[in-house]
Amino acid sequence: MVFSLLSVADLDGREFMELVNGAKRMKAAMARGRKTADLNNMIIGILFEKPSTRTRTSFQAAAIRMGGNPIYLPANELQLSRGEPVKDVARMLGGWLDIIVARVYLQDTLVQLAEYSKLPVINALSNIEHPTQMISDFLTILESKGRIEGLKMAYIGDGNNMANSLMLSCALTGMDLSIASPNGYKPSDEYVKKARRLSESTGSKIEIVTKPAEAAKDADILYTDVWVSMGEEKEAARRLRAFKGYQINSSLLKYAKSDAIVMHCLPAHRGLEITDEVIEGRQSVAWTQGVNKLYGAASTLKFIAKRK
Ligand code: CP
Ligand code: NVA
């Protein structure tokens, strides 16, 4: 069976940490621009339906640094944009490429890409998950805190793709997670249940609350994401009203531990989900977190290539 990474739940806790520790090793191996031979001339299709600064560039750069050949496939320049079915496109890519990295609107597009290409597919963000972000995020946590198990993360904001992947990742690794979202924007019951099931073996506590201060209390990590995700632009006005008060700012930071770190998957909107003062402040690790995406991508590609 070809292994695809479509959801964090495709991994068990040991595999998740293998990816995080792999990212740490790739960071050391790639120091000062060094190359590796892990991909041995493999051709990596980078199929993106949505914009990206970090994920696309880091996967392309990682592939090149690892001896692979990335080909960027913007969906709007494929026949997909003129109505060619995903499964027909997937059949073609399956004959030409070795791995597909895809950012899509619908999770089902990833499922079809995997089924009809018969290639390993890596989810580079969908409407419901962002699994590769987790590998570089947990590397950043490990670097900052020296451990993962037993920490408490507070996620403030939208119960979206990031919240889903964070719930599963915390559940797999024994980190407690408290999510504060306004009513109507809390994570789906399906994901909360899935995460709580996974947390039975690690003891991590997955909590959903309404008040940001309650989530932030004694947290080791404060995390936020945009209030309006890609594809939700039409809902922007309603969302900006609903999320007022769900900002990471210096007052909220006071509820967390004094050595808490602040994370943001980026892109950031200063003055909305986070203040300029906090994201530029001494507790922010957002820039390291973003740069670490190269090593998360490298570790994921290596993990997938080994299983091919
Ligand atoms: N965090 C993240 O996925 O960033 P991009 O949208 O720039 O890839
Ligand atoms: N929730 C955001 C994450 C961006 C990295 C989005 O889907 O747009």
Image (cartoon, rainbow, N blue to C red):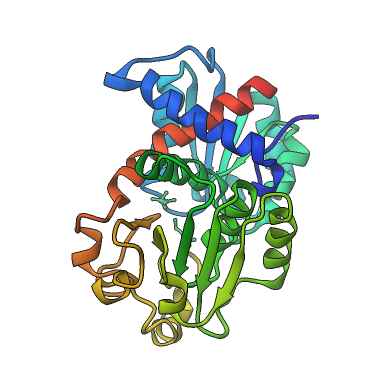
- Foreground residue, 282 or 5? 282
Q: Name which quarter of the figure residue 222 lies in.
A: bottom left
Residue 125, image x and y in percent?
54, 51
Name the residue at 55% across, 85% down: 183
Name the residue at 39% across, 18% down: 29
- Foreground residue, 22 or 283? 283
Residue 153, image x and y in percent?
47, 60
Residue 126, image x and y in percent?
58, 55
User: Does 298 sit above or below residue 227?
Assistant: above
User: Does 180 sit above or below residue 164?
Assistant: below
Q: Quadrant of the C terminus?
A: top right
Residue 271, image x and y in percent?
25, 74
Q: Is residue 46 visible?
A: yes
Name the residue at 60% across, 35% down: 100
User: Does 185 sit above or below residue 174?
Assistant: below
- Foreground residue, 70 or 171? 171
Give the left or right position of residue 242, taking residue 87 as reference: left
Q: Quadrant of the N terminus?
A: top right
Q: Name which quarter of the figure residue 35 lies in.
A: top left
Give the left or right position of residue 125, taking residue 270 as reference: right
* Number of marks in the rendered image: 0
Give the left or right position of residue 116, taking residue 41 as reference: right
User: Does 307 sit above or below residue 215?
Assistant: above
